[in-house]
Image (cartoon, rainbow, N blue to C red):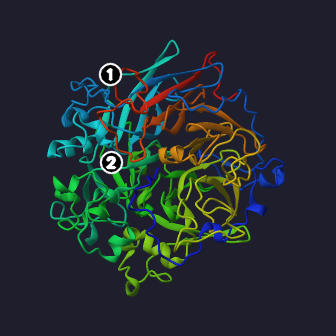
């Protein structure tokens, strides 16, 4: 999720068309009250592989109907699920992850140290994935998850005041990823501690650099003259599980942690660098984050990282062949001949959607035989045309404008400068493309366009017949079908929905008239039945401004994209983001994350008033709100959503 103060936003000054310059909502909105297009036409056979790795050549059967009564809009500091369901909290921020011999307890006053935080659950849980142990086990497995950013007002006992090297170390330790072991006994899930799999990845964990940027001149620093080993991952947002059993995580708004000089280079400007960064103040105590002293360090971040959760001794890798971006995440489809296709979006206003096609086929045997699979292949960027067609434009050095004369010395520089390369190729500027999901039944690819508050502002595209909203605070979901297979260079596209409440005179929503209402779609995921689960992320500022009246707290909904039926499944506590969705193989347990309960408009809390907005999930007087993982089950043990 991108924050309103993101410095990586609004840095695209290219003349490329935006998505709303080429979109005609009156013709290409799918889910409206009367279903504006024929379902049978939308779900014609796609002769391609499916996301899970098995190929399909037959028309999919319609998914079963959604079998629960939707919950009402809610604005209280509670987490609500439908009748017949139960939700329980595990793995909250500060809980020990279970590293053997090193399990410091949570200190509710924020007094735990940086060293303790480095082996505790990080702050602000985001994307997650379930990895079964012992085969296809639905009662014991691993959860890998992201910790996107920190609210230092809550993280430290003294809040933001008195910045110090220790506070910077603790903030760095609260970022990154966690791998934990979980198990179910008598229907109740808990963390398994200690566990040989338990692991934390922080802003100081060594990551190998793979792909065309490994050893590149722009990746070398005094601390790493070889340019092949970067320290840390941070601002990790969405995530996914690969068909070969690894975890992919996107480094999103990384540039906000770096401080630039008084004069910024065009490269730094295109990536939104500014002097002082976002206020994390890491550069004051760790010169890696002072871009004047270490100008190449920012180039070593903004990648999709790959982790093998089953091997606690493995070194994680930054996959540079997938391009550098404010990556929301990455999701894998499989071609008919067995190659990996990785889709990703860049969560920033007016940025791009990407697709990587691997050179080699996926090999059986898990992570090790596929250790370099994502290091070789071709990255593409999307162009959406007004007639509902689209092209994937290859980002290959020497082709078209991607030459040394235009500032791209080699393929590594094309990847490091993915934004500039996409500008040069004429890709379509999008409205914050975030999570993607691939329908396991049809092969359609879905992407959330969360919102774009800069739409119609000075020097940005304005309102026209194809773009009915200035200051688009409501967002929507776009989708496309590849023309032949997932590696195709052409596709057909339409909007699933323009979100918002039609009763809100500013929304002009299309498609939110069949089922429960929502705005600002962010996380999405398909379950095995082909039901699309949608999670929302309206910022606290939008709540206070009243921009999203009638929508309530952020929520999670189930959508049957074939019928248009959309039902609210869950509402979160005050000012949280509902994010991440993963299931056990039997579909009877769902895991989600609740991020930043009690978020303030500034994203920085006042430790003197910890209960001003929320103290979920502990509800202790004077307690601090904590992001946490939530386990959702049916009371009768049935499949979620049926």
Residue at position x 25%, y 46% in the image: 205
Residue at position x 43%, y 64% in the image: 323
Q: Are marks 1 and 2 in contact (CB under 8 Å)?
A: no
**In this rendering, is residue 76 above or below 317?**
above
Q: Residues within 10 Å of mark 2 (few under 14, many from 20)?
A: many
Q: Is residue 546 left or right of residue 219?
A: right
Residue at position x 20%, y 58% in the image: 288
Observer-side mark, 1 or 2, equals 1
Specify the quadrant of the image occupied by residue 101.
top left
Specify the quadrant of the image occupied by residue 169.
top left
Instruction: Specify whether residue 393 is in view.
Output: yes
| Spot occupied by residue 276 in the image (x, y as percentages of width and height) | 26, 60
| Spot occupied by residue 64 in the image (x, y as percentages of width and height) | 75, 34
Q: Is residue 403 left or right of residue 186?
A: left
Camera-side residue: 97 or 164? 164
Farthest top residue? 186
Q: Is residue 403 left or right of residue 472?
A: left
Q: Which residue is mark 2?
A: 316
Q: Residues within 10 Å of mark 1 (few under 14, many from 20)?
A: some
| Spot occupied by residue 496 in the image (x, y as percentages of width and height) | 70, 53
**In this rendering, is residue 222 above or below 170?**
below
Camera-side residue: 627 or 438? 627
Camera-side residue: 464 or 120? 464
Q: Mark 1 to mark 2: distance in Å?
A: 23 Å
| Spot occupied by residue 153 in the image (x, y as percentages of width and height) | 29, 40
Q: Which residue is mark 1?
A: 193
**In this rendering, is residue 437 above or below 188?**
below
Q: Which mark is residue 165?
A: none
Residue at position x 72%, y 69% in the image: 465
Nearer-N-terminus badge (1/2):
1
Q: Secondary structure at mark 2?
A: loop
In which quadrant will I find the C terminus? top right
């Amino acid at each position: 999720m991108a924050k309103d103060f993101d410095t990586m936003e609004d840095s695209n000054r290219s003349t490329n068309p935006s998505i709303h310059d080429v979109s005609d909502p009156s013709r290409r909105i799918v889910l409206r009250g009367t279903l504006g297009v024929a379902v049978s036409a939308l779900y014609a056979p796609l002769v391609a592989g499916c996301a899970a790795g098995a190929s399909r050549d037959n028309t999919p059967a319609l998914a079963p109907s959604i079998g629960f009564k939707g919950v009402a809009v809610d604005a209280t500091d509670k987490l609500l699920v439908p009748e017949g369901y139960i939700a329980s909290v595990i793995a909250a921020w500060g809980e020990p992850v279970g590293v053997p011999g090193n399990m410091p307890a949570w200190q509710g006053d924020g007094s735990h140290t940086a060293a303790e935080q480095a082996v505790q659950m990080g702050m602000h849980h985001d994307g997650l994935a379930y990895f079964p142990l012992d085969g296809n086990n639905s009662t014991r497995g691993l959860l890998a998850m992201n910790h996107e950013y920190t609210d230092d007002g809550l993280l430290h006992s003294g809040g933001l005041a008195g910045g110090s090297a220790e506070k910077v170390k603790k903030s760095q330790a609260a970022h990154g990823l966690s791998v934990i072991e979980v198990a179910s006994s008598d229907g109740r899930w808990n963390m398994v501690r200690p566990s040989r799999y338990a692991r934390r990845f922080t802003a100081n964990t060594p990551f190998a650099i793979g792909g065309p940027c490994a050893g590149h001149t722009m990746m070398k620093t005094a601390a790493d003259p070889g340019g092949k080993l970067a320290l840390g991952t941070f601002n990790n947002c969405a995530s996914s599980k690969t068909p070969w059993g690894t975890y992919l995580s996107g480094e999103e708004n990384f540039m906000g942690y770096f401080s630039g000089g008084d004069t910024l280079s065009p490269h730094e400007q295109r990536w939104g660098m500014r002097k002082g960064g976002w206020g994390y103040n890491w550069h004051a105590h760790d010169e890696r984050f002072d871009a004047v002293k270490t100008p190449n360090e920012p180039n070593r971040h903004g990648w999709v990282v790959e982790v093998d959760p089953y091997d606690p001794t493995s070194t994680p890798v930054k996959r540079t062949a997938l391009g550098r971006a404010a990556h929301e995440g990455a999701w894998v489809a499989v071609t008919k001949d067995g190659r990996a296709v990785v889709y990703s979006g860049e969560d920033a206003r007016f940025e791009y959607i990407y697709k990587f096609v691997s050179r080699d086929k996926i090999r059986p045997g898990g992570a090790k035989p596929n250790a370099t699979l994502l290091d070789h292949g071709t990255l593409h960027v999307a162009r959406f045309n007004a007639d509902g067609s689209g092209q994937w434009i290859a980002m290959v050095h020497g082709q078209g404008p991607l030459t040394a004369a235009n500032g791209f010395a080699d393929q590594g520089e094309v990847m490091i400068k993915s934004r500039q390369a996409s500008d040069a190729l004429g890709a379509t500027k999008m409205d914050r493309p975030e999570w993607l999901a691939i329908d396991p039944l049809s092969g359609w690819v879905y992407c959330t366009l969360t919102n774009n508050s800069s739409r119609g502002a000075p020097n940005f595209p304005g309102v026209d017949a194809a773009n009915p909203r200035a200051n688009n605070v409501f967002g929507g979901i776009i989708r496309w079908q590849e023309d032949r297979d997932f590696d195709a260079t052409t596709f057909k596209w339409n909007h699933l929905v323009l979100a918002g409440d039609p009763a809100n005179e500013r929304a002009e929503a299309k498609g939110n008239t069949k089922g429960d209402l929502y705005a600002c779609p962010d996380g999405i995921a398909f379950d095995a039945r082909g039901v699309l689960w949608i999670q929302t992320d309206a910022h606290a500022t939008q709540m206070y401004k009243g921009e999203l009246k009638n929508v309530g707290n952020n929520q999670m909904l189930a959508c049957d994209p074939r019928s248009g039926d959309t039902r609210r499944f869950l509402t979160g506590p005050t000012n949280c983001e509902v994010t991440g969705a993963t299931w056990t193989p039997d579909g009877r347990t769902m895991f989600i994350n609740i991020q930043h309960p009690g978020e303030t408009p500034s994203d920085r809390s006042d430790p003197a008033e910890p209960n001003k907005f929320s103290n979920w999930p502990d509800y202790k007087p004077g307690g601090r709100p904590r992001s946490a993982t939530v386990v959702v089950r049916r009371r009768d043990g049935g499949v979620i959503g049926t």
